[in-house]
Amino acid sequence: MSQMNKTNKTCLTCGCTSQEFLETGFLGCADCFVNLADAVTPVLSSMFGTSVHVGKSLIEAEGEYTRQERVAMLEAELRVAVREERYQEAANIKIQIDKLNEEGGL
């Protein structure tokens, strides 16, 4: 990722830094969205066209996103599920990704 933030801020709650976020794409906790906003907002805006969080469940907001955006969100959820060793959930997410890719001809 390009250097979007010249200052390396730290989340007051979990200690995650803006540099760690830019390198890994992962945040340490929900408070990182606020504490590291200078780094997080441009990344979310470029990925999803907005930096506004609409909820955890993709199903709730499914009509508000393009297929590509839903795939990107599911891929992010998949990485978290694997990292947290929630393999059954990861498998279900992978099935959703595969269905969306089949619909889009990818």
Image: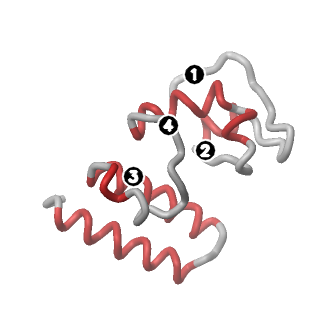
Indicate the quadrant where residue 105 lies.
bottom left
The residue where tag 3 is placed is 72
The residue where tag 1 is placed is 3
17 vs 22, left or right, is right
Residue located at (51% from left, 33% from top): 43
What is the C-alpha distance between the residues marked 2 and 4? 14 Å
Secondary structure type for disc 1: loop
Which of marks 3 and 2 precedes in the sequence?
2
Quarter of the figure that contains the C terminus: bottom left
Circle 3/circle 4 CB separation < 8 Å: no
The residue where tag 4 is placed is 44
Which of marks 3 and 1 precedes in the sequence?
1
Mark closer to the observer (1, 3): 3
Q: What x and y, as percent, mark residue 47?
A: 42, 38
Front-lying residue, 90 or 56: 56
Q: What x and y, as percent, mark residue 59?
A: 40, 66
What is the C-alpha distance between the residues marked 3 and 4? 11 Å
Q: What x and y, as percent, mark residue 11?
A: 80, 37
